Amino acid sequence: MKNHRLGQTVLNYRKKNGMTIREFADYAGISTSLISQIERGQGNPSLNVLELIAQALNVPLFTLFVNEIDTDSLISRKQDRKKVYRENSDHIVYDVLTPDFMKAHIEILMMDLNAHTATTASHYSHDNKEEIAIVMKGQAYVELEGTEYFLDEGDVVRIPPNIKHRFLNKSDKPNHILFVLTQSLG
């Protein structure tokens, strides 16, 4: 049973990195057949092989064994959610919606942006995250690389990594924008 969980973890990491078994085996310096056996839960790898796998996946060795999920942590209750404030906390509040936030590969945030405010004075960008923003209530403007775009309720914008951006609320009412951020594959 333990080997099956280890194998599933290795398989998941390998697929997340977009590698075939052969590519991964060549990269790790391990035979294709051994990788296949490990992933099917039939192999019994040595510590040296596990270290090679972890090194090839660019993860600490212990993460190959951390796959137990506390199902209670998969629920995010509204009253227990963390709030993140920007330096101008009077205007912007992010509500962290992601259950098990520290372990998730995705972040979901709800931003409340008060009337006549902006997320930042200048622009910001994410080096390694792709972002989707959905105007859930109200209207907003998004500035992408210096060009401003109007967004109505229900409109969605995709923001690839390294794109300078910010959000503005030019209306007299607050707006709510839902953000989904995920690690970039590029």
Image: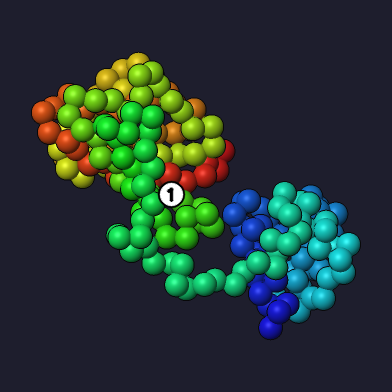
x 21%, y 33%: residue: 114
Quarter of the N terminus within the rendering: bottom right
Residues 18 and 162: in front is 162
Residues 10 and 127: in front is 127
Does residue 132 appear anywhere in the picture? no
Give the class, few, some or many, for how many residues have Cα within 10 Å of label 1's Cα (few <14, many ≥20).
some
| Extreme residue toward the bottom, this view | 1
Q: In the image, residue 164 lies at what x, y percent?
A: 42, 23
x 82%, y 76%: residue: 44
Q: Which residue is mark 1?
A: 107
Q: In the image, residue 180 lies at what x, y percent?
A: 38, 46
x 17%, y 29%: residue: 115
| Extreme residue toward the left, this view | 172
Q: In the image, residue 134 lies at what x, y percent?
A: 27, 42
> Which amino acid is tagged 1?
Glu
Q: Is residue 129 left or right of residue 43?
A: left
x 12%, y 33%: residue: 173
SS for tag 1? strand
Q: In the image, residue 108 lies at what x, y percent?
A: 38, 50
Residue 121 vertical placement versus 79 (above, below): above
Residues 87 and 12: in front is 87
| Residue 29 position by quadrant | bottom right
The scheme the figure's colours follow is: rainbow
Quarter of the C terminus within the rendering: top right
Residue 65 vertical placement versus 30 (above, below): below
Total tally of numbered discs in the picture = 1
Does residue 93 appear anywhere in the picture? yes
Q: Is residue 39 left or right of residue 107?
A: right
